[in-house]
Image (tube, rainbow, N blue to C red):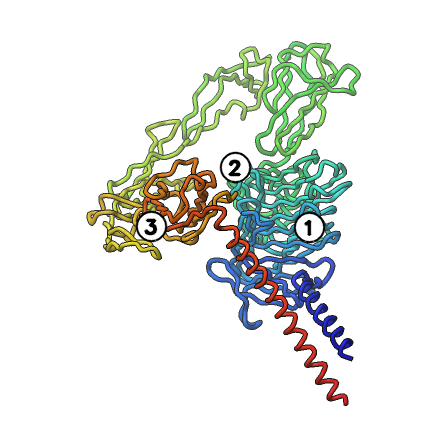
Amino acid sequence: MKKRIWNKVVSIFTAILLVVGIVPNTTITALAAGEDAPNTLYVGDQQVISIDNVITYWITSTDGKLTKSPDDQSWNVKYDPSTATLTLKDAKISGSYNEYDNPFTAGIYATGNSNQPVALTIELIGENTITGNYGIFLNAEISASSYGTNATLTITGENKGSLEVSGSSHGIFVKSGTGNASLNIEKATVTSSTNGGYAAGVNVQSSANATGSPNISLSVNGGSLTASGTGNSDGILFYVGSLQATGATTSLTVSENAIVDARNGGISASRILETLPTPTPMGNNSSGIVFDGSTGTVYGDVTLDERLTINQGETLTIPEGSTLNSNGNLTNNGTIVNTGGTLNGEPGGTIISAPTITSQPISQTVEEGDPATFTITASGNDLQYRWQKSADNGISWIEADGAATEATYAIEAATTGMNGLQYRCVVWNDAGSVNSDAATLTVDAHNHSLKHYEYKAPTCTENGNEEYWYCESCKQYFSDENATMPIAQEDTVIAATGHAYGEPTWEWSKDGQSATATFICDNDESHQESKEASITSAVKEEATCTEDGITVYTATVEFNGQTYTDTKEIADLPATGHQLTKVDGKVQTIEETGNITYWYCEVCDKYFSDEKAEHEITLEDTIIAKLPKFVSGANQEWTKGSKDGLTFKIDTDIKEFKKVLVDGKELKDTDYDIKSGSTILTLKPSFLDTLSAGKHKIRFEFNTGSVEAYFTVKDKENSSQTESANTGVQNKYGLWIVLLLVAAGGLAVFGILSKRRKNHK
């Protein structure tokens, strides 16, 4: 019976030891709410996915950090794992999460599960901001050896929510694993920017693990996306991360009056993609505007719901089949190019429309040797003209050599060889081209009564005229005295030049409180106009203790529908002077550092060694290091012939070490080894063997002070027995501890079993 009990005791005790050994290596993994939901979701500095997959609520601070909300009534961030939806309500988020322990931070960082797609919806309420090295990073490439498939990020703003994202690497970054990568914006106002080189405001990318034909897509349904880069960075980047993904495709779709604005940085495709995606409308309500750099294009039927400005040097094209209703929300400071579409509203500025011919050339019959003239009129902007004549077969057309002046083609003297030829004009501009009707020349056997008009130069306010001749008999105008080149009357007119006012000259008052802008006409310097400017001011540089602050004054005038500004900087904010606090000196100890006497200015946060603040120092310069202190190594014993030396550890930075002395004699570098970790110095056996048996004093000298200790050198024959005895004692202590633990465990179990047996009886 006792033997059985003892066996049970041993078995139970062994089982306990096994369990204790296993527990530290056991981990508990919470399952995700769905196979598409993120497995990891960091918002700012918090993992918002709870271990039991319930809805969590969070409050954001002014510096973008998150704290858990005590209830569901007061919150800025909410995550619902059942729908993989992250809701932001007037949230300010700052990047804190370090991916793979790299120094890169993300405002929002999400990854999925291996071999699975990952999808995240961000719902916007109110105005929200996100900053970080990455603003938002949805990453299906979990690690170098573990990755999912598709990555899908959807940003919604049904309640007119807005989001401003900025990142020094990328603003919004969606990266797939082995499959597709897509970013979808639904009725939200999203601004995403980067200030890093070779980054992107928005980067949609397939990873290095993608093969075959991954699709990289961006869609905007209602609302707007403004993506901006700086320097070498892109506004929007479609990127293929794998050279093996030779069939990769891209798509950019817009609907419901969406605006995609990549004017800063443009839209780019990298790696194996040869062409950018053509923006295409999607669904039944297909409409939108896409800006790629300075060039914008209207797709479908667009009615502007929000204000849009075309800046100087930018163009917006309305292609055939598209309609733009400005709805009073369009300001045109650049150029609108209508290539056959429809523009409703009055945006002002320059509008280039596809040309239309309003007056066709008329067939003519002239006598041989007389001139013939074909003229058309056309509507449109910045028109160019090229006259053509029919070839001999009357089917093909060749360029008509000779006197062509825009809309007029003149034949100096018709010949019978020209009889039956047809002439037409091709009219074009940046918006398109059109051919006029063909007019036929008939040559027969005609005399003029000519009056000569001299050339007259135009002025800013009066028309001038070209040199010309007028026939009072046939009421025709000619550009030559032989009346061989007929022209229209309007062709003789040189329009008044009008005033050509450029940038004004500015005259400022000394204090920056007033300024005058003077405009001088480039055509006539006597034509000048002056305008008093309105003045605003702003502090450019605050005054410091020693330097005056700078105010920037801005002058603004309106002239001929244009706004002109100029600035003037004045150092008119007096220096504040130092506000010094004296800090008395303190002597250092072995436990605490000391400090010198110094003065500190709370205004400029600077330190000085004198009360007049003439000698600036750093905070480090004020500190007097602690006195050196032994950590270990004092009163050691060393036996001659030992292979190991004696090691001493002193609590002082090794950079403060000067020298070490034994029995008053400074040691050579070859007598010891020294390393950092405070200061760790080991006397080499070769040196210790030179010392006589007995007690020796060792002294360490540092820049911060010195410390002494003693050690003993023993002859080998006097120490072997002591070492053996010490070793035996230590071994016995270890053995007794183990035996006592086993005995105590056994007695405890034996007592339990005995009690059970007595109760059973």
User: Does the CB distance between marks 1 and 3 fall below 8 Å?
Assistant: no
How far is the residue under mark 1 from the one under mark 2?
29 Å
Q: Earlier in the sequence, mark 2 or mark 3?
A: 2
Tell me where residue 641 appears, x and y as whole percent: 50, 43
**Residue ID for mark 3:** 625
Q: Which residue is at the front of the view, 106 or 612?
A: 612
Q: Which residue appears at 53% of the width and 11% of the height?
A: 481
Crowding around mark 1 (Cα neighbors within 10 Å: few <14, some 14 to 19, many 20+) is many
**Quadrant assignment for the N terminus:** bottom right
Going by the numbered disc 3, the residue's amino acid type is Ala
Going by the numbered disc 1, the residue's amino acid type is Ala
Tell me where residue 543 appears, x and y as whole percent: 28, 48
Query: Callout 2: helix, strand or loop?
Result: loop
Residue, far left: 612
How many marks on residues? 3
Q: Earlier in the sequence, mark 1 or mark 3?
A: 1
Going by the numbered disc 2, the residue's amino acid type is Gly
Q: Is residue 253 visible?
A: no
Q: Which mark is residue 231?
A: 2
Q: Which residue appears at 40% of the width and 50% of the height?
A: 711
Q: Which mark is residue 140?
A: 1
